Image (cartoon, rainbow, N blue to C red):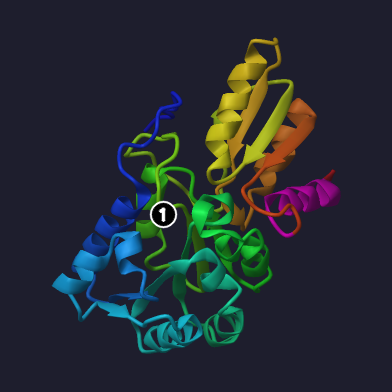
Amino acid sequence: MAIIYDSSLDKEVYKTVFGRTIEEIANEDGDVIYLDADLMNSIGTYSFWKRNPRQAINCGISEANMMGVAAGLSAGGKKPYVHTFGPFATRRSFDQSFLSIAYAGNSVRIVGSDPGVTAAFNGGTHMPFEDMALMRAVPGSTVIDISDAAMLECIIREIKDREGLTYVRTTRKSYQSVYSKDHPFTIGKGEVIRDGTDATVIACGLMVGQAMEAAKVLEDKQISLRVVDMFTVKPIDVELIIKCSKETGIIITAENHNIIGGLGDAVSSVLHEYN
């Protein structure tokens, strides 16, 4: 259990980690059902689908309908995981997620891949900078932004029995490795991955690695920067935010998302309410 950040990239791309983990979970628990909107090859679950079509369903390019199917599976006692690209997992199917899943009291784990700038050459139509804002607005929801491969594997396992709507955003590629493979994560609790006394950067997702790089640059300028990985954007770690505010004074947020409705908004709300 350790922070292992040294600027190097994870050895496995995240779609490989995701595909392997989903198949392992499904093999361990017969109630796990994986749903995809014709992107199994893109997220590393195609082979699993071929090997186990009873627990993996390709719903086609019909994301809203897929959320309804997932809600029905949950109502029937199953544990559905749903994947598609971030904008389709949130904007395109928001009404179904809100009503059929959250409002109806069902439990579905929605994975939105390639959020924000990670969509790269797929362009603006595939770049959600408001997906966390949408999912944070759903009463009772959980919103998680994945930082590295170790976290992805752990969180995908951790949410299997979690109640309600859980939204996990992750890239399909690989970014800086932050945690050792056996590092435990607690949903709702941030991770202080570098201590500092002059200011705190609260980051999530791919910006965690960037915050660590910034801290190294500032160290050469005799500025001590604390870095917090706030991977759970909802429910957010109120106690840690207040603690960092009191100890370092300055709070900065970094996210691959619009500040409106995202991590910056969440942290600002905490500081406004409690300070």
Residue drawn at (62%, 58%) of the image: 235
Percent of width and height locating residue 147? 48, 44
Rendering coords of residue 92 (x, y %): 58, 77
Q: In front here: 195 or 5?
A: 5
Residue 240's place in the image compared with 112, above or below, is: above
Prevailing SS of the magenta stretch: helix
Residue under circle 1?
155
Asked if residue 262 is among those painted magenta in the image, a careful observer would answer: yes
Q: Is residue 44 left or right of residue 274?
A: left
Q: For the point 76% across and 57% down, which residue is it? A: 260
The three-letter code of the residue at mark 1 reads Ile
The image shows residue 31 at horizontal and vertical percentages of 27, 77
Above or below, 145 relative to 190: below
Instruction: Tell me which corner region of the image, top left, top right, bottom left or bottom right, holds residue 177.
Output: top left
Which span of residues is magenta-colored? 261-274
Residue 235 falls inside the magenta stretch:
no
Q: Would residue 191 be seen by someone viewing this image from the given angle?
A: no
Rendered residue at 70%/31% (across/down): 200
Q: Classify residue 265 as left or right of residue 186.
A: right
> Measured along the vertical axis of the image, is residue 100 above or below residue 1?
below
The quarter of the displayed image where residue 192 is located? top right
Within 10 Å of disc 1 (Cα), the crowding (few <14, some 14-19, many 20+) is some
Instruction: Name the quadrant of the N terminus.
Output: top left
Quadrant in which the C terminus appears: top right
Query: At x 68% / y 44%, what residue is drawn?
Result: 239
Q: Position of residue 221 (x, y in %)?
A: 70, 11
Q: How many marks?
A: 1
Q: Mark 1 falls on what kind of element? A: helix
Of residue 221 and residue 28, the one placed in the foreground of this image is: 221
